[in-house]
Amino acid sequence: MATGVFSEGRAKIAQRTLRTDKWWIQPLITVGVLFSFIVYATWRALENAHYYAEPLISPFYSPCLSTTCVSGSSLLGTPFGHILIFGMVLSPAFIILIFPLGFRMTCYYYRKAYFRSFWMSPPACAVAEPHAKYTGETKAPLIVNNGHRYFFYIGLVFNTLLTIDAFLAFKNPEGQWGHMSLGTVVLLLNATFLWGYSASCHSCRHAIGGRLRHFSKHPFRYKAWTIVSKLNTKHQNFAWVSLIWVAFSDFFVRMVSLHPTWNKYFF
Amino acid sequence: MTLEKHKYDVVIIGAGGAGLRAAVEAREAGLSVAIVCKSLFGKAHTVMAEGGAAASMGNVNDNDNWMVHFRDTMRGGKFLNHYRMAELHAKEAPDRIWELEMWGALFDRTNEGKISQRNFGGHEYPRLAHVGDRTGLELIRTMQQRIVALQQQDAKEHGDAEKNMKVFAEVTITEILKENGKIAGAYGYRRESGSEVLFQAPAVVIATGGVGKTFKITSNSWEGTGDGHALALKAGANLVDMEFLQFHPTGMVWPLSVKGILVTESVRGEGGILTNSLGERFMFKYIPDVFIDKYADNEAEADRWYEDQDNNRRPPELLPRDEVARAINSEVKAGRGTEHGGVFLDVSKRLSAEVIKKRLPSMWHQFYELAGVDITKEPMEVGPTCHYVMGGVEVEPDSAAAVGVPGLFAAGEVAGGMHGSNRLGGNSLTDLLVFGRRAGKGAADYVKANGANPVSDAAIEKAAAKIEAPFTSTGGENAYTLHQELQEITHNLVGIIRTGAELTEAIEKIADIRKRSGNISVTGDRKFNPGFHLAFDLDNMLLVAESTAKSALLREESRGGHTRDDFPGMNSTWRQVNHISSFDGDKVSIKSQPLPVLPKELFDLFDVHELEKYMTSAEIAKGGSN
Amino acid sequence: MARTLKLRIWRGDDKTGGLQDVTVEANHGEVVLDIIHRVQATQMGDLAVRWNCKAGKCGSCSMEINGKPRLACMTQVASYPEDEVITITPLRAFPVIKDLVTDVSFNYKKAMEIPAVVMPEGMKPGEPRMQQVDVERSQEFRKCIECFLCQNTCHVIRDHEENKKSFSGPRFFIRIAELDMHPLDMLRNRKKTAQEEHGLGFCNITKCCTEVCPEHIKITDNAIIPMKERVADEKYDPVRWLGSKIRRREEVL
Ligand SMILES: Cc1cc2nc3c(=O)[nH]c(=O)nc-3n(C[C@H](O)[C@H](O)[C@H](O)COP(=O)(O)OP(=O)(O)OC[C@H]3O[C@@H](n4cnc5c(N)ncnc54)[C@H](O)[C@@H]3O)c2cc1C
Ligand code: SF4
Ligand code: SF4
Ligand code: FES
Ligand code: FES
């Protein structure tokens, strides 16, 4: 039976949409970027090499928790030993990547992005979606999205670790402090963007003050909430910049591990 | 087709602020209520009110009280107001606002957490409760939600939300039915299907709002076709003082398609200044004698007033609307207008962009989206627009009962008397609530005392025949064309400045259009057919225009919303006279009726020297009634 | 600066209908509603359209123009290129009545299902004290002019008629949020009912409601997402759930 815009009683119009603008460009770009990222990240995780170039560590592999990690890369030790799947060593990157992946999969902004571009529900506003049924986030597995705040908390741990990584990048390859290189800048920016992404998160906005009913009784939290709210309007931008920069940071570390001279030292 | 019939205790025509408040009151008094309106529920014209609702709560300046408000209202109306209405209004307005808050309204707040109040033309103290510049929306949504809340109660108690109160949206009432000289019900059609509806009810409350669509340039929506005025006339009630129409000084003038759309007075309340094409702040030249001690005569003082209102006089931009509208009209006529025939209104000099967007958000949008003007950077172009009708159904102040027709009540813009010759901004919204409530109560008391009054078949047949007429007519007149012709006539001949000769001409021309309107034929069928709808609205507008032109011809003075070029001054003898319109089925006739005399206790609220400017020496000597 | 416009206007009723070509003059500064009125006055006397204020304040003139849900009175003709044919249709999420007029009663039914504000017991008119910062969030939602464009564009019901019974739509999520954030409202089960009765969970925050809202209400960011977070506090966050059992924080906040 016809449903949606073709339902009984609605205006009889044959087209799924009468939009004349190029509404499909946006979802197409989203698919392009996200897909490229996934391909790159998977390849890099499987590569399981070139993620550490004293003192730089790739954010895909930090903190490296497995005994297979190259020496110097395991800030928090190696509690996992090494994990074998089908007789193959699991790349330590997967243990790490699963968390940011969860964070981003449940992110309110990325939900919009992937529901529109991958799932096409809807591909764009007032463009009929191709599905016959729709239950949104009322059932498993999508109901998990309601737990976004837990991924947000975990995200904070990672942000902290990656910030430490950025500070460690003030060393030179010989381990002496007080130096700064291109890599330092790359990792610092990486940490900054990630903090921006987390700070502008909707769960953060809620926790910081959004859940209050009387702002007037909590002046400090209100102030914090107004700041987070401002950042929050830029959450989409932080989401993309931080994503792309994480990949770039990893790429940079990889290149440095292959060509140490690429990491120009300023002092 | 079988006729759709309903029985209620009270039928309320109109779902604006007045109608909804009346409905709540009648329902709470235990009666069953039908609310009938021409558009969807929640879209009535009240939604467009911007600036605020005047009530002397004294939240911002505690010198304010009902007596000050009463004085301002009388002054604004040039003492032609029905004193009792102005008194009730001033006394009850605060309660009506506070009640809205209990029903969920969220007004802007003061630092103490009370309802904030803003300045407005003619009000001595900051008095307008407001929400940004969308106060009417807040009011109507709150009333709408109150109605829904009462319906939810009924649903819980009786399993039927519409048991005691039902909204009939998109139904136009074409006739008020009477039996034995008393109200028996109302008749109309569903806009959607064109099918007819009969309401049987011993009491009818008219709350149909204004008449702006009679004019070419107006801030009113299509609903402002004076239906209630005409329905009341046809039912045998009177209209009082129909010559008084308020031309709001600041309507948009460009582009043409938005000409007339209102620019809220809050723009001036927040510090907007008016200048002509020479860059001159011209309002200083137009302060009338009666206001000389209340308004600043130089820019420095006017500017200081925004910071210190106790020690400075107000800027003349905040004079009552009739004064400002005439001033703008004169400037434009003298060749000092803008390219599109208006003057400049500028807030960008006094307020920062951020503050403008916060305090006047919908004005910012309106100009940005409709005229491509950014009011945080550039001035607006504005000119007078037909905004409000002070005249209306003659009612008993305490019960809002229409004089002469038992069972008929009227409240809101459609009722006359409250505002005299000119309404102060913000007084309408509280007028709706105060008298809406009184009309609801009046109707409830009436129904309890009188019981049902069945409608006869003859009356139904007559009403039905009228609705069918435009479909059977082969006269070939087009309702849209006639409407445009009427608007030209009123605009050119009954507009902001009038003369005896022009009014006489107007009366003839209106009669001519009336004759032709009998030959309107419509194309298409009954289903949601705007041409068919307009045929009825036009008939109402013609009656209103006739009554306005005739009253205006008789009043040989200039006062408030009535300016005669041939009789420029205000005349104390004319202040003692109301003009009463009545209809004999063929034409409107006007008679003079003495204005009720101010009782002593209200008379004494004024400084005698002030009253001397308005009243004859005999009246002053008498010092009010009893 | 008059120009000749080519339009396609949908005409018909709940059974049949289609796009009809019309050519009409347009003047400088005119909006689509002006054009429709001109067509009405000169060519199609019985063309059905709803409107009231012609100033974007009443939310009556909702329709779809070139496939996008919009207010006709706020859509400038000049925003379309000279040679573009402008297609005008009724809203496509609701049953059509005639031409550009649709049956929006769905929305009034949903409004009926949300309990009004409940003020503290014993509080009398004139007594409420509320701070501006505490009412501001709810005030944003009260800007709603009930144009129902958000409802119309929301794919949950636009594309799935069967969801109408269990989904109230963005207009009513902001109403619930308004009341939940109201500083004095005493009815405290609004989060629960939002999720269980009004179908908040159906929303996948794809933000079309925000995109079309003529009042620029941030429906998703400021109402739906905060409500989802509030629902999570109560239903999906064991830590907070436990906390709320131990100390009844709601009143204190
Ligand atoms: C742009 C603008 C701004 C304003 N700003 C302010 C302000 O800031 N402060 C202030 O105090 N006042 C203001 N006013 C004035 C005020 O808004 C109106 O006077 C007031 O809203 C009128 O309310 P009402 O209840 O009498 O009627 P309306 O709100 O006009 O409602 C009339 C109702 O009657 C119905 N109706 C009419 N005819 C029929 C019929 N034949 N059959 C069935 N139903 C019918 C209509 O459908 C409608 O529901 C403003 C007016 C305008 C135009
Ligand atoms: S964000 Fe949610 S409510 Fe808004 S349109 Fe999308 S699905 Fe509907
Ligand atoms: S929220 Fe916006 S789009 Fe939705 S009904 Fe209200 S004003 Fe219209
Ligand atoms: S990270 Fe995007 S909303 Fe939390
Ligand atoms: S007519 Fe009121 S919003 Fe368009």
Image (cartoon, rainbow, N blue to C red):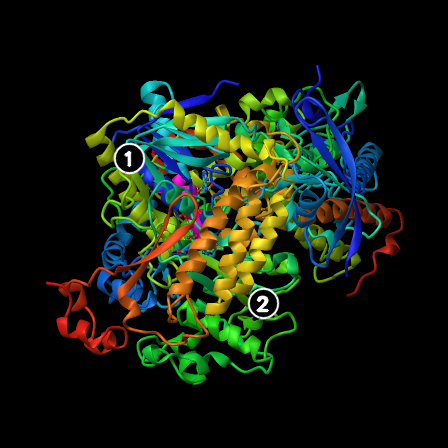
Instruction: Give the left or right position of residue C141, taking residue B77 as reference.
Output: right
Say what amino acid the circle numbered 2 marks.
Thr
Is residue B99 visible in the rendered image? The answer is: yes
Residue type of the residue flagged with mark 1: Gly
Residue B486 lies, in percent from the top left, at 56, 54
Q: Chain of mark 2?
A: B
Q: With respect to residue A219, does B166 lie above or below?
A: above
Q: Which segment did they paint magenta?
A: B135-143
Q: How many marks?
A: 2
Image height of B217 relative to B103, above or below = below
Q: Are marks 2 and 1 on the same chain?
A: yes
Marks 2/1: CA–CA distance: 58 Å
Residue B104 shows up from this direction: no
Locate residue B84 relative to residue B144 in the image: left or right: left
The residue that disc 2 covers is B376
Magenta stretch secondary structure, dominant: helix
Q: Residue furthest left?
A: B626
| Figure quadrant, ligand 3 | top right
Picture residue at 45% right of the left edge, 72% below the top: B324
> Which residue shows up at 81% across the image and 44% down it?
C85
Considering only vertical position in the picture, is B218 above or below B123?
above
Q: Give the secondary structure at mark 2.
A: loop
Vertical comparison of C204 with B384: above or below: above
Chain ID at mark 1: B
Residue denoted by label 1: B181
Residue B137 covered by magenta stretch: yes
User: For this view, does C238 lie left or right of residue B88?
Assistant: right
The one nearer the camera, A100 or B17, is B17
Q: Residue B328 lies in magenta, yes or no?
A: no
Q: Nearer the viewer, residue A108 or A185?
A: A108
Sequence-wise first label, 2 or 1: 1
